Amino acid sequence: MGAWGAGPLDNDPAGDLLDELAQARHEDLPDLLGSAFRRVIAADGVIDSWETEQALAGAAL
């Protein structure tokens, strides 16, 4: 079952990111969030919606 809503944390990509962060060691959190941001920043042309939604969720944290 998917998650749907209007907020930046109300979607499946955000849920996946939150799960990944919850399972990570505290010292790895900055790198995980940075990775989500870098994937969008480094995109050439069309940005994948999944990656965009994860970056927005990371920014909302």
Image (cartoon, helix red, strand yellow):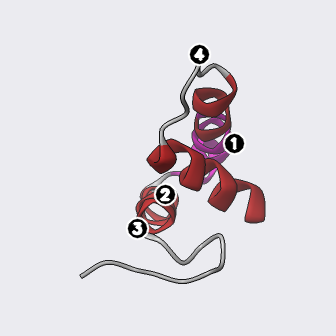
Image quadrant in which you'd find residue 44? top right
**Proximity of marks 4 and 1: CB atoms separated by less than 8 Å:** no
Give the class, few, some or many, for how many residues have Cα within 10 Å of label 3's Cα (few <14, many ≥20). some
Q: CA distance from mark 3 to mark 2?
A: 9 Å
Please state the extent of the stretch shown in magenta in the rendering: 25-35
Image quadrant in which you'd find residue 61? bottom right
Give the class, few, some or many, for how many residues have Cα within 10 Å of label 4's Cα (few <14, many ≥20). few
Residue 30 appears left or right of 43? right
What residue type is disc 1 on?
A: Pro
Q: Which residue is mark 2?
A: 17
What residue type is disc 2 on?
A: Leu
Q: Which residue is mark 3?
A: 12
Q: Quadrant of the N terminus?
A: bottom left
Label 2 or label 1, whichever comes before in sequence order: 2
Give the class, few, some or many, for how many residues have Cα within 10 Å of label 2's Cα (few <14, many ≥20). many
Q: Which residue is mark 1?
A: 30
Q: From this viewpoint, is residue 61 visible? A: no
Residue 13 appears left or right of 45? left
Label 4 or label 3, whichever comes before in sequence order: 3
Label 4 or label 1, whichever comes before in sequence order: 1
What residue type is disc 3 on?
A: Asp
Q: Which residue shows up at 51% across the image and 43% down it?
A: 51
Q: Which residue is mark 4?
A: 44
